[in-house]
Image: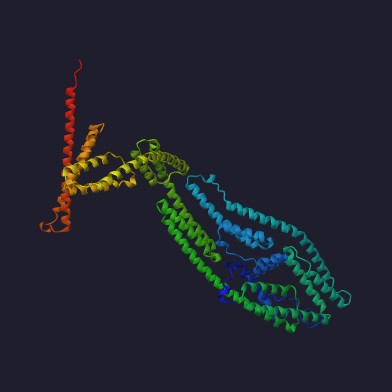
């Protein structure tokens, strides 16, 4: 068999297969002792010299070999209990160690539904052990999380759907198993009684006073009845078998008185054993090594239990051939197991590497929620890799599993410590979000949409920046905050829908003025043309807002106005002042003139200060350049910017002057009106 085919045999069969190796090897040591020499008619038959030597080697075998023989006897007894039990060798033994709890439940369901209960005991026991191991680790983690979140360990409860499903399937298995053995027990007892009767009949054949041929015929009938007698209780199997063969030997001792019948039996036994030897030799090239070994064990069972002795002249030769074929397969298996041992060592190295990664992770737990969540995801990936890494040497299994659990637990403790410290921060976050909720509730019915909208957007942005709050408050707090915000913005959108029609009307008016401005032709009379342009400026100013997406219409309008003023040779400053004349007129028409003028004066003074500061800063920058660097593009740019700011400063000062004149005129008019008012008597 190629090396590739040998590796297809799963690792999980290692323990069982190794037992079978020793079983076959041990069978080599147990060439049946029923065979006797025919040197003297009246002397007991004795084993040949090679068998005596072999028997001595068996007696010197280690206690371990004795234990293995016990395992062989137990396995044979289990197989003999029910023919269906033997099917356990045909059911694949999967890598249950690498499976998740959910997958283990699925595999258990398949076995219980599709296989005989008496054939899946080892599979079910392994699945049960692996599930309990993983569930115990899982529940310990959940308990630590519960305690870390402030719970009392005595109050910890966890309802696992997966555990409940496992218990249901395992209970179903136990019920089927118990029912099976209950039904089997009665028939086993009956079969045992019948076999004991056959043994008594066999005992009665010795020294019977009748024709030897008749006695031999009766012996063969007893053998046939024995083969068809059915299974017995496993605990009685080996004792019954040994007793039966003991009396078979006694009968053959008795049979030596009739050599003709004995020689016929020897001949038949030789033919049957040669068939077994040939089949065993053929198994040496069987590609499926696991299948070859199972069949070899069956051959040893038949050799030992079903076929009697052969003649002395053939005894050693036929046994050596059978033993040699067995050793050949045994050596192949031993080499295969060595390779599996090497693989187990590699698996151990890989698992230790994964454990060290988890240890490193536990020693460097992040100090923020996002970082820890990322590490938790990484830990889950490492856990999955650990379970998929394969089995390790049996002697290292407990140590490796313990190291793995401790490393994972260390990470979880450090993670839980972080979240425990985070609780104070969560309480602070709760206070902050409650404060934002109060603001949202106070603004949700506000009519000052311009101010309230900015504040609402601010607190929404602030809300996103605040971290987690205790879970029991989280949902309700967010629901209340969201309700207040939605209430406000629903009102805002409704208001905008009402004002949108008005904005569209304003847009239509401005588009009409813009069209007239585009079609305006200069008459050549500067004063007249300026008045016409100012008239359109005045009309433009009194029109309200347009939709936000169309607000660039104002830029188009002023660009055309500036172009017309440029054609009329009006400087930018004069143009700005002409436009400002409309602003002055609008201020005169305000209901609350005093407040409107004061706000405008404050705005202009602010612009004057900004222009002065910009000029000072730019002129200071120029001092860093030498006198001969005027041609430097950077210097030219600074000079140009200084000039523009100076022009703007002059413009703002002129506007302030016009505004002061307006204010003085209005105050004078108010004073005159007060003087002209009639006095009351």
Residue at the farthest front position: 523
Judging depth in this view, the residue of 645 and 584 nearest the camera is 584
Q: How many marks?
A: 0
Residue at the farthest top position: 681
Q: Is residue 74 visible?
A: no
Q: Give the residue displayed 43% in from the left and 44% down from the top.
A: 469
* Residue 161 versus residue 677 in the image, above or below: below
Q: Give the residue displayed 51% in from the left and 59% down from the top.
A: 402
* Residue 601 versus residue 108 in the image, above or below: above
Quadrant containing the N terminus in the rendered view: bottom right
Residue 9's image quarter? bottom right
Quadrant containing the C terminus in the rendered view: top left
Give residue 125's position: percent from left, percent from top.
Answer: 63, 60
Q: Is residue 96 visible?
A: yes
Residue at the farthest left position: 627
Q: Give the residue displayed 64% in from the left and 61% down from the top.
A: 111
Residue 328's image quarter? bottom right
* Residue 69 versus residue 655 in the image, above or below: below
Give residue 557's position: percent from left, percent from top.
Answer: 26, 46
Colour mode of the rendering = rainbow
Judging depth in this view, the residue of 281 and 455 nearest the camera is 455
* Residue 526 versus residue 43 in the image, above or below: above
Give residue 533's position: percent from left, percent from top.
Answer: 22, 43
Give residue 333's position: percent from left, percent from top.
Answer: 60, 74
Judging depth in this view, the residue of 2 and 255 nearest the camera is 2
Residue 662's image quarter? top left
Q: Is residue 593 left or right of residue 33?
A: left
Residue at the farthest bottom position: 313
């Amino acid at each position: 068999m190629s090396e590739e085919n040998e590796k297809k045999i799963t690792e999980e069969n290692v323990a069982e297969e190794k037992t079978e190796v020793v079983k076959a090897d041990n069978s080599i040591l147990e060439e049946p002792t029923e065979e006797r020499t025919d040197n003297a008619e009246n002397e007991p038959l004795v084993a040949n010299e090679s068998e005596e030597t072999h028997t001595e080697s068996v007696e010197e075998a280690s206690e371990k070999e004795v234990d293995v023989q016990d395992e062989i006897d137990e396995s044979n007894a289990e197989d003999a209990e029910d023919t269906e039990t033997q099917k356990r060798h045909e059911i694949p033994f999967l890598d249950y160690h690498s499976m998740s709890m959910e997958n283990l439940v699925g595999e258990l369901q398949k076995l219980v539904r599709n296989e005989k209960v008496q054939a899946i005991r080892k599979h079910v026991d392994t699945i049960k052990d692996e599930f309990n191991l993983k569930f115990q680790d899982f529940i310990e983690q959940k308990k630590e999380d519960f305690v870390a979140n402030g719970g009392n360990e005595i109050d910890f409860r966890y309802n696992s759907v997966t555990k409940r499903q496992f218990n249901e399937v395992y209970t179903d298995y136990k019920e089927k198993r118990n029912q099976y053995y209950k039904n089997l027990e009665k028939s086993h007892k009956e079969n045992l009684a019948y076999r004991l009767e056959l043994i008594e009949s066999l005992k009665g054949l010795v020294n019977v006073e009748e024709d030897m041929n008749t006695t031999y015929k009766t012996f063969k009938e007893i053998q046939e009845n024995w083969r068809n007698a059915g299974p017995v209780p496993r605990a009685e199997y080996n004792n019954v078998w040994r007793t039966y063969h003991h009396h078979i030997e006694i009968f053959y001792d008795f049979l030596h008185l009739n050599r003709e019948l004995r020689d016929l039996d020897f001949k038949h036994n030789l033919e049957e054993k040669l068939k077994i030897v040939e089949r065993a030799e053929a198994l040496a090239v069987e590609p499926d090594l696991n299948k070859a070994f199972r069949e070899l064990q069956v051959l040893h069972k038949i050799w030992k239990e079903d076929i009697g002795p052969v003649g002395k002249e053939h005894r050693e030769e036929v046994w050596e051939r059978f033993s040699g074929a067995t050793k050949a397969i045994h050596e192949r298996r031993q080499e295969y197991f060595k390779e599996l041992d090497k693989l187990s060592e590699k698996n151990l190295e890989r698992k230790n590497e994964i454990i060290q990664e988890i240890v490193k992770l536990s020693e460097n737990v992040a100090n923020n929620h996002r970082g820890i969540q990322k590490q938790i995801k990484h830990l889950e990936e490492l856990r999955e890799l650990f379970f998929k890494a394969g089995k390790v040497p049996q002697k290292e299994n407990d140590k490796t599993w313990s190291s793995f659990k401790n490393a994972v637990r260390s990470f979880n403790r450090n993670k839980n410590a972080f979240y425990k410290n985070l609780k104070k921060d969560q309480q602070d976050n709760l206070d902050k979000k409650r404060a934002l909720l109060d603001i949202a509730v106070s603004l949700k019915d506000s009519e000052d949409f311009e101010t309230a909208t900015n504040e609402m957007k601010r607190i929404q942005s602030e809300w996103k920046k605040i971290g987690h709050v205790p879970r029991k408050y989280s949902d309700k707090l967010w629901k209340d905050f969201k309700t207040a915000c939605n209430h406000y913005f629903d009102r805002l959108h409704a208001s905008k829908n009402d004002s949108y029609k008005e904005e569209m009307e304003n847009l239509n008016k401005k588009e009409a003025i813009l069209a007239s401005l585009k079609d305006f032709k200069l008459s050549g009379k500067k004063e007249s043309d300026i008045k016409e342009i100012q008239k359109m400026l005045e009309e433009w100013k009194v029109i309200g807002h347009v939709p936000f997406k169309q607000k660039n219409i104002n830029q188009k309008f002023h660009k055309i106005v500036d172009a017309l003023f440029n054609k009329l040779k009006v400087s930018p400053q004069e143009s700005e002042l002409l436009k400002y004349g409309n602003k002055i007129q609008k201020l005169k028409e305000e209901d609350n003139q005093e407040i409107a003028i004061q706000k405008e004066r404050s705005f202009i003074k602010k612009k004057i200060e900004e222009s002065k500061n910009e000029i000072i800063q730019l002129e200071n920058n120029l001092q860093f350049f030498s006198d001969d660097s005027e041609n430097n593009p950077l210097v030219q740019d600074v000079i140009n910017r200084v000039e523009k700011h100076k022009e703007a400063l002059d413009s703002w000062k002129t506007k302030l002057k016009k505004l002061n004149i307006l204010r003085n005129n209005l105050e004078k008019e108010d004073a005159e009106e007060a003087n002209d008012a009639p006095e009351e008597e």
